[in-house]
Amino acid sequence: MKRKKIPDEAVRRLPIYLRGLLSLSEQGYENISSKKLADFVGVNHSQIRKDLSYFGGFGTPGIGYNTENLRRQIRKILKLSMVHKAALVGVGNLGLAVLRYPRFGIFGFHIVAAFDNNPKKIGRRVGNITIEDVSNLKALQQRKIKIGIITVPCEAAQETFDKLVAAGIKGILSFSPCYKKGRKKVKVITIDIAMDLARLPYYIATRPTTRLAKRGR
Ligand code: ATP
């Protein structure tokens, strides 16, 4: 039987629900309605129900969702119930910030290795990780690392991308948009901070400058 195609957007929202559920459980909610979860995470409640229906629903009429059970189910769907080891390439300012971010663990992610090509950085320690030479990337498969994080500058992104793919990496989170697409077996998620910033002013109401001009300022 052909598996129903689940929209990427629905998958993208699951971690948002998971994070909301974590906070709601901490606040003592055993059961929650889709409306409560919707208000908490800022997504329309019918959207939440629709997204969850792709995976089986999980709610009980009149009661809503059991927070613990829904958390467990979402973790299972996202395959977050197992530990995922990740390697980061490019320990500059951005790479350091990502390496030091303490909350990936709650989603089962552990950055266990970091690489750079700058001899002054190789051998330095960041927390419990020692920065390695990029030539060690080849050994990622033996180390059972399947996720790569790219924080090198734009001009080094393609080369880094190719090295990670050659090393058997299955998923890449890239903070650099500068690489070619078309690797069918590798899932790439790009975070392009500049692109997100570029659309932000569109949503910000600006005061017409003519008003200021009228007041003679
Ligand atoms: P810094 O000035 O300390 O290097 P930065 O954030 O300004 O920090 P970037 O030029 O953005 O540095 O580079 C990010 C990191 O990527 C640096 O640590 C750099 O040494 C590393 N890097 C650059 N090219 C490569 C490469 N081909 N392979 C691995 N690491 C690289």
Image (cartoon, helix red, strand yellow):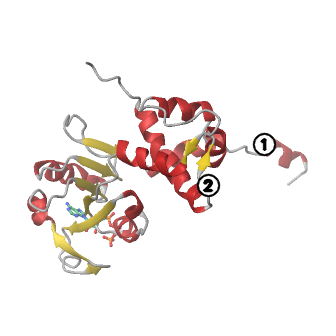
In the image, residue 28 sits, relative to residue 176, either above or below, namely below
7 vs 171, left or right, is right
In the image, residue 46 sits, relative to residue 115, either above or below, namely above
Find numbered disc 1 in the image and state the secondary structure of the residue it sits on: loop
- Residue 155 is situated, as x and y percent measured from the top left of the image, at 26, 53
Badge 1 residue CB within 8 Å of ligand 1: no
Mark-to-mark CA distance, 2 and 1 = 46 Å
- Residue 66 is situated, as x and y percent measured from the top left of the image, at 54, 46
Label 2 packing within 10 angstroms: few (<14), some (14-19), many (20+): some
- Residue 41 is situated, as x and y percent measured from the top left of the image, at 60, 47
Q: Amino acid at mark 2?
A: Tyr
Label 1 packing within 10 angstroms: few (<14), some (14-19), many (20+): few
Which corner quadrant of the image does residue 207 belong to?
Answer: top right
69 vs 79, left or right, is right
Q: Nearer the viewer, residue 94 or 37?
A: 37
Q: Residue at the location (42% across, 38% down)?
A: 11
- Residue 100 is situated, as x and y percent measured from the top left of the image, at 38, 71
In the image, residue 107 sits, relative to residue 7, either above or below, namely below
Q: Which residue is mark 2?
A: 29
Instruction: Tell me the quarter of the image containing the N terminus.
Output: top left
58 vs 1, left or right, is right
Furthest-right residue in this view: 215
Badge 2 residue CB within 8 Å of ligand 1: no
Find numbered disc 2 in the image and state the secondary structure of the residue it sits on: loop
Q: Nearer the viewer, residue 215 or 141?
A: 141
Q: Which residue is mark 1?
A: 208
Q: Amino acid at mark 1?
A: Pro
Instruction: Tell me the quarter of the image containing the C terminus.
Output: bottom right
Ligand 1's image quarter is: bottom left
